[in-house]
């Protein structure tokens, strides 16, 4: 399947299956929208947006749980699980990869059991976002969530932009490790940044911008 802009959108509750010998290639954006997905493209086949396009994976039903990584488990009527096979089908040649949208998203957990690395720009929209492991991208990272909990770490070689309407915190007791590494880190709207002086956010950034925060900040 190839074209300029490609969009595959199913009705709520339906499952999208892309077989191993199937490629979906757009020169612009590629959007896959389904409440359950099995993405198996492999062996030279892949799912790819153009070098200036966005490869977007999103549920149809707002509030659908999103799990990303080797420990994502199986899809269910309430959970869109993007496991290692699904991730392997996504081409790193895409200009950007996006999970969720600003209007359709749910509680999101990234749990790979080890570090999870992306090459393109990475954008995640979530209700509550939990990062269990080391999540990195070789470009820019953008996340928008109500609450964001970092139990592992976030790393980008460019700009990391976090828009958090609630609390931005790290896991208790992990205050000696770097939580966020980036060239530029922008934090927008957070009600609280870090938990306290002991469980502060540990940053390795060249430039830090905090905007609209209406609570205490511990860094």
Image (tube, grey):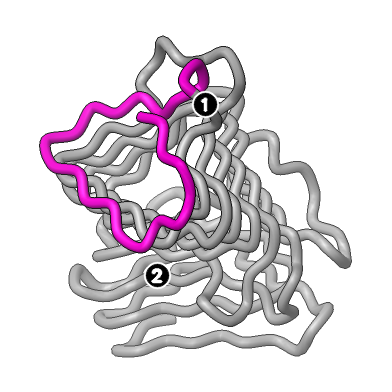
Task: Estimate the x, y position of residue 199 in percent, counting from the top left.
Answer: 51, 21
Q: In the image, is 78 to the left or to the right of 40? A: right
Residue on which the image places disc 1: 196
**Magenta region includes residue 178:** no
| Quarter of the image where one finds residue 211 | bottom left
Part of the protein shown in magenta: 197-219
Which quarter of the rendering shows the N terminus?
bottom left
- 10 lies above or below 186: below
Looking at the rendered structure, the secondary structure element under dot 1 is loop
Q: Earlier in the sequence, mark 2 or mark 1?
A: 2
Task: Estimate the x, y position of residue 137 in percent, counting from the top left.
Answer: 30, 43
Camera-side mark, 2 or 1: 1
Outermost residue to the right = 77
- Disc 1 crowd rating (10 Å Cα; few below 14, some 14-19, many 20+) is some
Choose between 105 and 77: the one closer to the eye.
105
Choose between 181 and 207: the one closer to the eye.
207
Instruction: Determine if residue 45 is in view.
Output: no
The label number, if any, that marks residue 148 in the structure image: none
Q: Which residue is located at x 61 percent, y 20 percent?
A: 172
Residue on which the image places disc 2: 55
| Quarter of the image where one finds residue 59 | bottom right
Instruction: Determine if residue 190 is in view.
Output: yes
Q: Which residue is located at x 69 percent, y 64 percent?
A: 106
Q: Which residue is located at x 55 percent, y 69 percent?
A: 100
Quote the CA–CA distance across marks 2 and 1.
38 Å
| Quarter of the image where one finds residue 2 | bottom left
Task: Estimate the x, y position of residue 49 in percent, counting from the top left.
Answer: 33, 72
Q: Which residue is located at x 62 percent, y 35 percent?
A: 111
- Disc 2 crowd rating (10 Å Cα; few below 14, some 14-19, many 20+) is many
Looking at the rendered structure, the secondary structure element under dot 2 is strand
Judged by its main secondary structure, the magenta piece is loop
**Magenta region includes residue 209:** yes
């Amino acid at each position: 399947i190839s074209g300029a802009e490609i969009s595959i959108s199913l009705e709520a509750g339906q499952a999208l299956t892309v077989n191993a010998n199937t490629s979906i290639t757009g020169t612009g954006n590629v959007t896959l929208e389904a409440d359950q997905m099995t993405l198996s493209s492999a062996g030279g086949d892949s799912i790819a947006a153009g070098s200036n396009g966005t490869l977007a994976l999103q549920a149809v039903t707002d509030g659908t749980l999103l799990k990303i990584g080797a420990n994502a488990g199986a899809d269910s009527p309430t959970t869109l699980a993007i496991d290692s096979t699904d991730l392997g089908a996504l081409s790193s040649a895409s200009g950007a990869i996006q999970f969720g949208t600003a209007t359709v998203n749910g509680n999101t957990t990234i749990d790979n059991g080890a570090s999870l690395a992306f090459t393109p720009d990475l954008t995640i929209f979530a209700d509550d976002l939990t990062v269990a492991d080391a999540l990195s991208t070789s470009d820019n990272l953008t996340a928008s969530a109500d609450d964001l909990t970092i139990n592992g770490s976030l790393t980008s070689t460019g700009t990391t932009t976090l828009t958090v309407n609630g609390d931005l915190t790290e896991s208790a007791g992990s205050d000696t490790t770097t939580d966020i590494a980036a060239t530029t880190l922008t934090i927008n709207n957070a009600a609280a940044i870090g938990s306290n002086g002991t469980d502060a956010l540990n940053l390795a950034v060249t430039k830090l911008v905090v905007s609209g925060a209406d609570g205490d900040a511990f860094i």
